[in-house]
Image (cartoon, coloured by chain):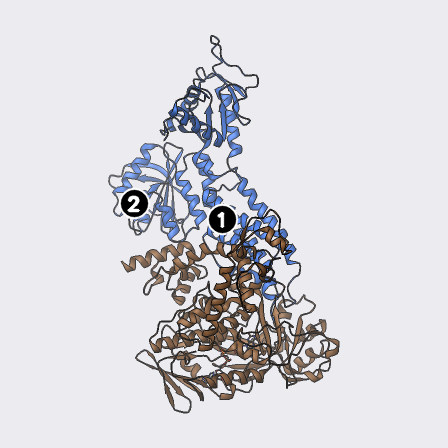
């Protein structure tokens, strides 16, 4: 992103080969996550296009539900995904890939001046984005085994971890885990339910041209009573329960031992068997992330239908790593205490490729903006999941790895995976981070949309619609074609005889216009809310507030406010536990301080 | 006005009354209490003390005093309470002594409430309850206001909010985790039933008598043709409690509103222009229109005109029964027969008014709503109704979110995270 904006950019990683590596499940998208992927794509990031080039299985989650919560998800071939990412990075001007370990951030007169490498060399830079993933102080656990590192077979970043801890940045530990990989040739596929790839040709990026890779199917099995018994008996051998790992893992991706422990009364849990690629036999059993010893893993895997003879190729493990309390960051993901230092991805307490991609994009955009002296406009909670996530992170902090959910977005009816371009590409063009091709595509798309919307203002009577065989009540009033679209039985296609002019429209644009019409009354109702939000967003709380000096704030509120340092009244109001009374007191204090 | 001052005020109704409570709040409250009563009692215990003027040692009153050190007090500051005998002279003397103390001053209207609010000691609903308390003039008003200020409404609203959160969590689980099998099925039905039940619950609360009835009084409108004895009756009714009657000149020249307390219940009696259909000049005609408007919004309508012409809700009143000399209108089914002049029948009417009023006022266990609360709860039920009619879970969730926002606004708080907590407390989801 930074390179595209014109900044000279170095991408530093242990090995060039690891760039584009998928640590865990090679799946991209999902509920909430699919929205992030589309948003990153709308800002001209790479993840959606790379996913399309590697996708061996497409599935639109929630396809039976309202479009605002439908989540596009693909299974990617690991190798193809990595190849696609590396190819696109290779084509990027201004970008230099540097192999090696970053040992320290260099700081001069209070701001970042570059990084020092473990081999003694250094790289000068006015802005540095840290995206250390699970590598910062990474430590892996499997039964009684302990390994240093952030991913199996890869070293951890311990020098950097030491420096950050010494710099008195608020660091903490989180953990995550991954399931064992199974040799697909030892699975009895014939006896399992299969899930084919979606047949309609949607893609992750509207810029991709259909499916480019052969499609495979996934299969579904279940844990059973016997699985649970094996796990229960061996719980004390799991580092999660023996006390070896103290850090909090994601509630949304619990390990299988967590599931058994917390929801022991259930008789089984679904497990999806997902192929990792076209030319590999590795299969990813989605749903049984674990850090039990290898012998226990083998035993419980074999207790499941279809897996009676399964061979584990790589056993599952848990990883514990350092992250920074994201409340130390501002909304541009810059560390407040060290200007020029940005953090993105798992280091900020999130989990998932999509969350990491979205943050990397914002941090890169903001860092380049700073270096190039350019004002960057960022989206807000009403225009993107991306902003919802960042706002949540920097105001609320994390107590467990943060994963995107549609429920986190209060304005999700307007934040649909389908309309990401409409919401964000214009802003990205303004920030100068969109390539020429996408910009041309977007402008064409907006022109087509405007043309159709104008044509849809034409009023039409019930009789006209009835004449087309549409199910309308005879006593209905005359209204614009756009208003007619609100009715579930009426689609753009069905109205086409009444639409004047020639319109050449992409599927995603048609979907967007239809959905806007359906949600129109709800969106109108939200407008007042948004006015309030934006009004409060303009009330600046000014410089540094000493929250301890405000009478009436509980210790808890003082702590939360001091960590998050909200810049506006709206932000302060979103911090958990802050009451309107407290807000009033803060505002009075801020005003008095300013006077 | 400075937040750091120590303030005091009479916080019970106007004297004379059995008891008068003076509250002192702020950093100087402890000193003031010690100066008056000769030392600080142990916190939060009522003790009987002689209150003396610190300047000349003169005895002011024997009173219950209470000492609440901040910040966990009603105002969030040091707080003292003096429960005095409620005579006017006593109250005035104690106020005068307090006003002479350094850094103490009489509170502005609503200042205790504002401090409590700014110090985070009450939520919006509680603050509103308290502001009503400041207006309280009669016993019934006081009791209802106290009930609300002590969190009765807040607790009730909180329980509704929890139910909205629970319903939302069920739907969110379905929306965000449906592809994982660990979510209960049949969400549409369960939440549909829950929404209907909750809406009818809140709807019932909305049907209950409103707080304004307590604050503004039960509206009793006297109506009838000119010279039917309305004014005489009004005077007779009002004279009984003349001490707390104050005439508020009607903004119109022809509607006269008189607030009065009868047996502890607030009433507003409205005397209207005499009604006649013909021969009225322009101004009088306007008066007649207003009279008809007043009749329409009356809680109780006393009809002194020809039987059967006051409308179905009217109480038929036969007046001037002491006058045998004139040809007066008699009624076959009068609810009351009386003479305002001699007082015959008047007690019966008053008893009837009081008994009827009690059914119109919030009862002992009820929560009374003010206009703002009523509006927000109506918004909440409207949102619930929309949610109930909506089969699309996503749109149902959106309407539930609106319902929750209305309740949040009532309690003065908002957060998506509460909902997520409810979600993850109850389900095994994800993998
Ligand atoms: C075991 C495991 C299980 C996971 N399970 C899940 C899951 O169940 N669900 C889910 O959504 N997500 C899961 N993830 C998380 C997902 O992989 C990450 O959230 C995502 O990849 C984070 O992206 P990132 O860019 O922040 O970091 P990463 O993808 O981890 O990339 C970090 C990169 O930085 C390099 N690096 C780090 N430190 C240095 C240094 N000092 N010098 C040079 N290079 C350095 C590393 O070599 C690596 O290439 C899991 C990850 C792991 C490892």
- Judging depth in this view, the residue of A552 and B188 nearest the camera is B188
Corner quadrant of residue B176: bottom right
Q: What is the crowding at mark 2: few (fewer than 14 residues within 10 Å), some, or many (at least 20)?
A: some
Q: Secondary structure at mark 2?
A: helix
Q: Is mark 1 within 8 Å of ligand 1?
A: no
Chain A: what color?
A: brown
Q: Is residue A374 left or right of residue A285?
A: left
Asked if residue B187 shows in the view, the reply is yes
Quarter that holds the C terminus of chain A: bottom left
Q: How many marks?
A: 2
| Residue A466: image location, x then y, percent | 62, 53
- Judging depth in this view, the residue of A423 and A465 nearest the camera is A465
Residues at marks 1 and 2 touching, judged by CB atoms closer than 8 Å: no
Marks 1 and 2 sit apart, C-alpha to C-alpha, by 38 Å
| Residue A458: image location, x then y, percent | 52, 56
| Chain identifier of the blue chain | B
Work out which residue is located at the far right of the displayed protein and give it. Answer: A191
Which dot marks residue B367?
none
Q: What is the crowding at mark 1: few (fewer than 14 residues within 10 Å), some, or many (at least 20)?
A: many
Corner quadrant of residue A481: bottom right
Asked if residue A338 shows in the view, the reply is no
Chain name for mark 2: B
Mark 1 sits on what residue? B154
| Residue A135: image location, x then y, percent | 49, 82
Mark 2 sits on what residue? B35
Q: Is mark 2 within 8 Å of ligand 1?
A: no
Q: Residue at x 43, y 45 (%)?
A: B128
- Judging depth in this view, the residue of B60 and A414 nearest the camera is A414
Quarter that holds the N terminus of chain A: bottom left
Q: Is residue A248 left or right of residue A540?
A: right
Chain name for mark 1: B
Give above or below for B132 relative to A173: above
């Amino acid at each position: 992103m930074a390179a595209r904006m014109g900044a000279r950019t170095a991408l530093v990683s242990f090995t060039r080969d690891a760039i584009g590596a998928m640590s865990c499940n090679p799946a991209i998208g999902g509920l909430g996550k699919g929205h992030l992927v589309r948003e990153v794509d709308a800002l001209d990031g790479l993840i959606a296009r790379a996913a399309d080039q590697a996708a061996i299985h497409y599935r639109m989650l929630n396809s039976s539900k309202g479009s605002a919560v439908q989540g596009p998800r693909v299974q990617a071939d690991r190798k193809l995904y990595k190849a696609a990412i590396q190819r696109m990075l290779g084509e990027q001007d201004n970008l230099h890939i540097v192999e090696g370990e970053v040992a320290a951030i260099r700081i001069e007169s209070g701001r970042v001046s570059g990084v020092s490498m473990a081999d003694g060399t250094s790289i000068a830079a006015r802005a540095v984005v840290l995206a250390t993933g699970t590598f910062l102080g990474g430590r892996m656990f499997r039964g009684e085994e302990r390994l240093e590192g952030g991913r199996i077979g890869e070293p951890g970043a311990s020098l950097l971890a030491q420096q950050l801890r010494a710099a008195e940045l608020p660091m903490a530990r989180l953990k995550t885990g991954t399931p064992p990989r199974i040799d697909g040739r030892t699975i009895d596929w014939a006896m399992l339910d299969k899930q084919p790839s979606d047949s309609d040709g949607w893609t992750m990026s509207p810029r991709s041209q259909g499916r480019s890779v052969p499609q495979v199917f996934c299969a579904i099995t279940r844990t059973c009573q016997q699985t649970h018994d094996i796990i229960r008996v061996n719980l004390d051998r799991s580092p999660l329960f023996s006390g070896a790992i103290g850090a909090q893992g994601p509630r949304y991706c619990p390990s299988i031992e967590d599931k058994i422990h917390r929801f022991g009364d259930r008789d089984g849990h679904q497990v999806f068997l997902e192929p990792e690629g076209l030319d590999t036999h590795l299969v990813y059993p989605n749903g049984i992330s674990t850090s039990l010893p290898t012998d226990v893993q083998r035993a419980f895997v074999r207790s499941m239908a279809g897996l009676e003879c399964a061979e584990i190729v790589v056993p599952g493990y848990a990883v514990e790593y350092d992250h920074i309390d994201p409340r130390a960051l501002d909304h541009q993901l810059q560390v407040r205490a060290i200007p020029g230092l940005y953090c993105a991805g798992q280091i900020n307490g999130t989990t998932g490729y999509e969350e990491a991609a979205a943050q990397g994009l914002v941090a890169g955009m903001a860092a380049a903006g700073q270096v190039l002296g350019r004002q960057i406009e960022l989206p807000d909670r009403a225009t993107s999941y991306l902003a919802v996530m960042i706002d949540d992170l920097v105001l609320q902090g994390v107590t467990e790895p943060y994963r995107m959910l549609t429920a986190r977005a209060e304005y999700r009816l307007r934040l649909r995976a389908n309309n990401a371009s409409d919401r964000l590409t214009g802003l990205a063009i303004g920030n100068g981070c969109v390539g020429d091709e996408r910009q041309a595509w977007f402008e064409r798309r907006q022109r087509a949309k405007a043309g159709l919307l104008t044509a849809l203002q034409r009023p039409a009577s019930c009789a006209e619609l009835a004449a087309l065989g549409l199910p309308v009540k005879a006593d209905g009033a005359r209204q614009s074609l756009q208003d007619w679209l609100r009715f579930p039985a009426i689609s753009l296609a069905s109205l086409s005889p009444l639409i004047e002019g020639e319109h050449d429209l992409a599927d995603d644009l048609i979907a967007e216009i239809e959905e806007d019409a359906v949600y129109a009354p709800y969106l109108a109702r939200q407008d007042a809310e948004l006015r309030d939000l934006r009004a409060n967003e303009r009330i600046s709380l000014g410089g540094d507030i000493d929250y301890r000096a405000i009478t009436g704030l509980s210790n808890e509120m003082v702590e939360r406010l001091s960590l998050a340092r909200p810049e506006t009244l709206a932000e302060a109001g979103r911090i958990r536990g802050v009451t309107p009374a407290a807000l009033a007191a803060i505002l009075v204090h801020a005003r008095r301080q300013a006077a | 006005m400075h937040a750091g001052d120590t303030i005091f005020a009479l916080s019970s109704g106007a004297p004379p009354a059995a008891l008068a409570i003076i509250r002192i709040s702020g950093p100087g409250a402890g000193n003031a209490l010690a100066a008056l009563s000769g030392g600080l009692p142990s916190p939060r215990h009522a003790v009987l003390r002689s209150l003396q003027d610190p300047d000349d040692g003169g005895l002011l009153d024997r009173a219950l005093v209470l000492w609440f050190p901040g910040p966990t007090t009603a105002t969030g500051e040091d707080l003292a309470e003096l429960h005095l005998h409620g005579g006017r002279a006593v109250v005035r003397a104690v106020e005068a002594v307090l006003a002479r103390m350094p850094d103490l001053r009489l509170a502005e209207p609503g200042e205790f409430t504002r401090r409590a609010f700014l110090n985070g000691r009450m939520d919006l609903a509680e603050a509103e309850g308290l502001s009503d308390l400041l207006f309280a003039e009669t016993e019934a008003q006081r009791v209802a206001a106290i009930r609300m200020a002590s969190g009765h409404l807040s607790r009730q609203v909180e329980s509704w909010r929890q139910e909205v959160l629970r319903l939302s969590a069920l739907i969110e689980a379905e929306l965000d985790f449906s592809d994982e099998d660990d979510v209960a099925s049949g969400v549409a039905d369960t939440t549909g039933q829950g929404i209907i039940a909750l809406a009818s619950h809140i709807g019932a609360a909305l049907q209950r008598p409103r707080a304004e009835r307590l604050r503004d009084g039960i509206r009793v409108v006297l109506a009838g043709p000119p010279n039917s004895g309305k004014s005489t009756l009004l005077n007779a009714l009002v004279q009984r409690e003349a001490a707390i009657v104050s005439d508020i000149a009607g903004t119109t020249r022809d509607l006269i509103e008189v607030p009065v307390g009868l047996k502890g219940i607030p009433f507003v009696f409205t005397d209207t222009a005499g009604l006649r259909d013909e021969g009225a000049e322009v101004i009088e005609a306007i008066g007649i229109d207003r009279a008809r408007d007043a009749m329409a919004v009356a809680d109780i309508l006393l009809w002194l005109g020809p039987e059967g012409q006051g409308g179905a809700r009217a109480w038929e009143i036969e007046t001037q029964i002491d006058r045998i000399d004139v040809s007066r209108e008699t009624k076959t089914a009068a609810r009351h027969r009386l003479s305002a002049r001699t007082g015959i029948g008047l007690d019966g009417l008053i008893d009837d008014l009081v008994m009827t009023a009690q059914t119109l006022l919030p009862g002992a266990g009820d929560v009374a709503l003010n206009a703002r609360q009523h509006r927000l709860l109506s918004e909440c039920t409207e949102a619930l109704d929309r949610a109930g009619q909506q089969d699309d879970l996503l749109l149902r969730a959106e309407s539930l979110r609106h319902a929750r926002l209305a309740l949040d606004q009532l309690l003065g708080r908002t957060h998506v995270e509460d909902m997520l907590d409810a979600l993850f407390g109850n389900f095994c989801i994800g993998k």
